[in-house]
Amino acid sequence: MTTPRLYLSPPHMGPDERRLLLEAFDSNWVAPLGPHVDAFEKEMSAKVSGLHCVALSSGTAGLHLALQMLGVSRDDEVLVSSLTFAASANPVTYLGAKPVFIDAEASSWNMDPVLLAEELEACAKRGKLPRAVVVVDLYGQCADYDVLLAACAKYQVPLIEDAAEALGATYQGKPAGTFGAMGVLSFNGNKIITTSGGGMLLARDEAFATKARFLAQQARDPAPHYEHSHIGYNYRLSNLLAAVGRGQLSVLEERVKVRRATNAFYRQALSELPGVAFMPLSKKGEWNAWLSVITIDPKVFGADRETIRLALEKENIESRPVWKPMHLQPVFKECRVRGGRVGDQAFANGLCLPSGTAMTDGDRQRVVDVIRRVQRR
């Protein structure tokens, strides 16, 4: 009998999601927009300090719109966290601009404020400041925004918070997604809550939210016919998917609690093993524990990260290396980077473990047992 597969971060649906989805279906309001979209935006706003929320088809769409609304255009530069998924950097290129990558700090794996300040100073001396800075909240942990925002403010460069992985986390008591000019959330299938595919743009300025809605609905001008004075996009969220999102949002705190418990389980079971450490956590906030990440010192542990990953896969357990930094990606090989050592090391030695909210202690123990067997060998 095949052992059930353990996935890294699978969707976790409940009865409320089913009820709301069927309600939307039975109403025949299945096209983009509708009452569930409006309600999802309102309910999310209550979670993120009352910011203006725009439900979209993906977090990537949110970043694209945010960059465009900040005036990013061809030949501009945008400073971006290097240790992240490609979706943090790709929208920069959609607008003809060029990403410049900033390495992580060792204490949190988020953008290094010292390196950001150095790059901004160097840009100022060259006479070409970046149009924006995109900071990623990695694996559900907020970056050090007090310092990052101060560095940006010195040069009047706006900051966008890519909080795709961080809904439910906080920094200095404030929720993820609420720092900078705009923030972006993702509801992809592997996130802490999901709409199967979807995202949200968060804006302090209502004008940004109004413009985002306009652009995301094909930029249709007010007229009885189809009139367009701007190029728009088909980026709005379906009413059906928003219904699912509402059900998911109602259990967000519970999902965060479970993920933190999973991380605590792994820490208790694995921290004593030689050569095993965990992703560093900042003391300036509370993470949502989206993914539990270990690092392996192969000389001390006796095997490398890839050996563990393959051993887990053999037991039908999914795990994945830490994000390969953007400055190492072939598609961005011509882009400038400041630093790189921290991201390189995290990628070389880091492994993401199964962290889904439907896992049992028996599931978690399966993961631990495999890692222990590898170490004993």
Image (tube, rainbow, N blue to C red):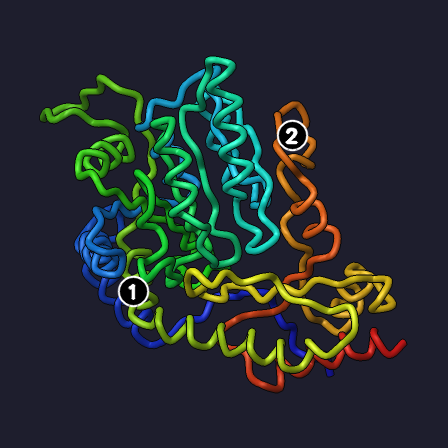
Image coordinates for residue 208, horizontal then vertical, percent: 23, 35
Measured Cα–Cα span from mark 1 to mark 2: 39 Å
Task: Judge by depth and name the residue closer to the eye, 100 or 310.
Answer: 100
Mark 1 or 2, which is nearer the eye? 2
Q: Secondary structure at mark 1?
A: helix
Task: Identify the amino acid type marked 2.
Answer: Val
Question: Horizontal placement of 355 versus 222: left or right?
Answer: right
Image coordinates for residue 288, horizontal then vertical, percent: 44, 65
Residue visible at 11% across and 26% down? 222
Q: Is residue 297 above or below residue 110?
A: below
Question: Horizontal placement of 154 versus 118: left or right?
Answer: left
Image coordinates for residue 270, horizontal then vertical, percent: 69, 77
Task: Judge by depth and name the residue closer to the eye, 148 or 344.
Answer: 148
Task: Identify the amino acid type marked 1.
Answer: Leu
Residue at which label 2 appears: 331
Q: Quadrant of the C terminus?
A: bottom right
Q: Is residue 29 visible?
A: no
Residue at which label 1 appears: 21
